[in-house]
Image (cartoon, coloured by chain):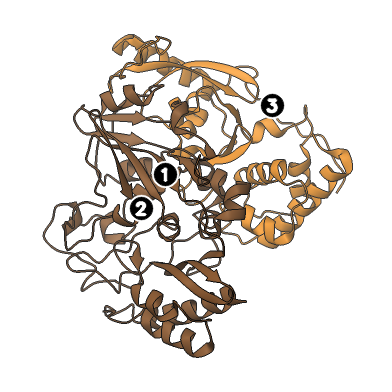
Chain colours: A orange, B brown
């Protein structure tokens, strides 16, 4: 398949309905419950009823927002910031659909508190785009038909990106081991392995980001 | 959505310890087990005390006596990839490499792996079992395919950690701090069997934190390995696991430390195997005797009798692999 332009909106650009509602909700809650600053020298225990100011660097952009201590990074990405490429499925660290990169390493956003991601570089599937073109791992998944329903695909691609960042030329066994934290109920595994293999080869040849 | 809690992320151990006085405080290392337990309402907490911003708890570095220090919050992935671990501590390297999934290894910490809660499906499910304060162990007469064959007594879980038997085989020691004191606890003495108390997993008090794990210098002639057998090839807990740390003098086993996972509510020391192999060259007859010794005294439940043959076969293969 030829590489073609995708009409995917840039992450964080413009105002989406979901994002607008999310930010209104967060602001309203902050007015109702008060705000705790986390920039003080001595750490303070945040009240469970209070919203806390935090700043998350996602796909290179700093997002300042109010969160509850119990909110996961997955919830904040999807429901507060409208960055919905990251998928919610099991929400218990068992399926991999919420995989994001935190400081270049794949992690489950469902088991990561938003407050714990402060100070780290967070990369979601949206952050793997090269401008308006698909990134190389994304393109490899298209070319190798590495999905059926597609629901696990963002997590698979981000996990593959994380694997290739530490091991640009993985063997098949290393791919199976490195991708074992992501389940595909359609069973597209062999095509996923093919896609990751070829994305790695492209990267090794200097075509990567 | 998780139940509500307050959160604090101090930047020093001293501050972290001061917050453990709070009612119902729970420690957050990497958070993988804590968040899962909170989501499943295994317990609730008023305060989450995060250790993730404390530099002094991080890192993997050599000690003055030739051993290795693992900071409490060193991740499982950092340990699995560490050249010193890979070169000198084979059981730990093997074990860290097969913990959970890549994502969980990137997040989970070594101290958290030692202190994780059981994975018994009754404990994790809607059963008020003995360990959660109820009256009985539901696994004993229930679905016990994955449960213990040693040391059950009143609660028939298996301890879920892979790194614990490996660290125990290497003779590792935890350094533990409370607001008022510090102490050392050998990894092999860290976990509490149900015969002592079925409602606690470790000897740690509520106001204590593991700060680091110290592993002795690898003796000359050490060969060490860990292997676990799962229901599938990746990303699962051990049905059966064997950690070996054997010191060879030429071809002869001079000393041995052998621990099992998937066998008992705590990492299980296989003393009979150690006795069977010390002083031998691991000839076939010795390995046969060691395989039998692995399961000597085992008391399988109604649905986990397969573990007897599994442990015998696993011990045989691991001893054959380590002698060559």
Q: Which marked residue is nearer to the observer: mark 3 or mark 2?
A: 2
**Badge 3 density bin: few <14, some 14–19, many ≥20, Cα 10 Å:** few
The residue tagged 1 is B213
In the figure, is residue A130 to the left or right of A75?
right
Q: In this view, does B202 lie above or below B263?
A: above
Looking at the rendered image, the quarter that the C terminus of chain A falls into is top right
| Residue at the spot 46% in from the left edge and 49% down from the top edge | B215
Q: Observer-nearest residue: B250 or B238?
A: B250
Q: Which quadrant of the figure has residue A45?
A: top left
| Residue at the spot 53% in from the left edge and 64% down from the top edge | B224
| Residue at the spot 31% in from the left edge and 69% down from the top edge | B147
Q: Which chain carries label 3?
A: A
Q: SS for tag 1?
A: strand
Do the residues under discs 2 and 1 have CB atoms within 8 angstroms? yes
Distance from disc 2 to disc 1, alpha carbons, whole Å, reads 9 Å
Residue A124 position within the rendered picture, expressed as x and y whole percent measured from the top left: 62, 33
Q: Earlier in the sequence, mark 2 or mark 1?
A: 2
What's the mark number on residue A9? 3
Q: Observer-nearest residue: B195 or B289?
A: B289
Q: In this view, does B138 lie above or below A85?
A: below
The residue tagged 2 is B187
């Amino acid at each position: 398949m030829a590489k073609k332009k995708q009409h995917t909106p840039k992450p964080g650009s413009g105002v989406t309905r979901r994002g607008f509602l999310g930010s209104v909700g967060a602001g309203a809650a902050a007015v109702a419950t008060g705000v705790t600053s986390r920039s003080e020298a001595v750490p303070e225990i945040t009240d469970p009823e209070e919203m806390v100011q935090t700043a998350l660097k996602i796909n290179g952009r700093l997002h300042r927002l109010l969160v509850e201590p119990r909110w996961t990074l997955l919830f904040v990405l999807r429901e507060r910031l409208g960055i919905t490429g990251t998928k919610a499925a099991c929400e218990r660290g068992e399926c991999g659909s919420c995989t994001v990169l935190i400081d270049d390493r794949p992690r489950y956003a469902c088991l990561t508190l938003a407050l714990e991601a402060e100070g780290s570089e967070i990369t979601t599937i949206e952050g793997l785009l090269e401008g308006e073109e698909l990134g190389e791992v994304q393109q490899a998944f298209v070319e190798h038909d590495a999905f059926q329903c597609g629901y696990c695909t963002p997590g698979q691609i981000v996990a593959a990106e994380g694997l290739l960042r530490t091991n640009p030329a993985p063997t098949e066994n290393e791919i199976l081991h490195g991708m074992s934290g992501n389940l595909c109920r359609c069973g597209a595994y062999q095509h996923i392995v093919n896609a990751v293999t070829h994305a790695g080869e492209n990267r090794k040849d200097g075509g990567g980001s | 959505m998780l139940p509500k809690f307050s959160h604090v992320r101090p930047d020093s151990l001293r501050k972290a310890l001061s917050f453990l006085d709070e009612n119902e405080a729970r420690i957050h290392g990497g958070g993988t087990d804590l968040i899962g337990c909170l989501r499943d309402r295994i317990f609730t907490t008023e305060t989450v005390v995060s250790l993730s911003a404390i530099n002094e708890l991080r890192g993997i570095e050599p000690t003055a006596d030739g051993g290795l220090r693992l900071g409490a919050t060193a991740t499982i992935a950092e340990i699995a990839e560490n050249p010193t671990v890979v070169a000198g501590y084979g059981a730990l390297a093997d074990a860290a490499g097969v913990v959970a999934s890549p994502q969980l290894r990137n997040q989970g910490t070594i101290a958290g792996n030692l202190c994780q809660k059981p994975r018994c499906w009754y404990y994790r499910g809607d059963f008020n079992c003995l360990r959660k304060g109820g009256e009985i162990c539901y696994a004993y007469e229930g679905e016990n395919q994955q449960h213990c064959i040693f040391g059950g007594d009143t609660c028939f879980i298996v301890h879920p950690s892979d790194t614990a038997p490996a660290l125990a085989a290497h003779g590792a020691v935890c350094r533990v701090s409370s607001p008022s004191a510090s102490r050392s606890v050998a990894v092999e003495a860290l976990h509490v069997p149900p015969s002592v108390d079925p409602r606690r997993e470790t000897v740690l008090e509520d106001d204590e934190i593991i700060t680091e794990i110290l592993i002795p210098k690898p003796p000359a002639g050490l060969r060490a390995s860990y292997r676990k057998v799962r229901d599938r090839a990746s990303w699962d807990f051990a049905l059966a696991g064997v950690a070996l740390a054997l010191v060879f003098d030429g071809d002869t086993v001079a000393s041995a430390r052998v621990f099992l996972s998937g066998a008992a509510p705590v990492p299980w020391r296989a003393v009979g195997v150690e006795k069977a192999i010390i002083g031998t060259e691991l000839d076939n007859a010795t390995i046969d005797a060691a395989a039998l010794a692995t399961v000597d005294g085992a008391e399988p439940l109604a649905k986990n009798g397969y573990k007897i043959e599994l442990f015998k076969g696993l011990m045989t293969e691991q001893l054959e692999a380590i002698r060559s």
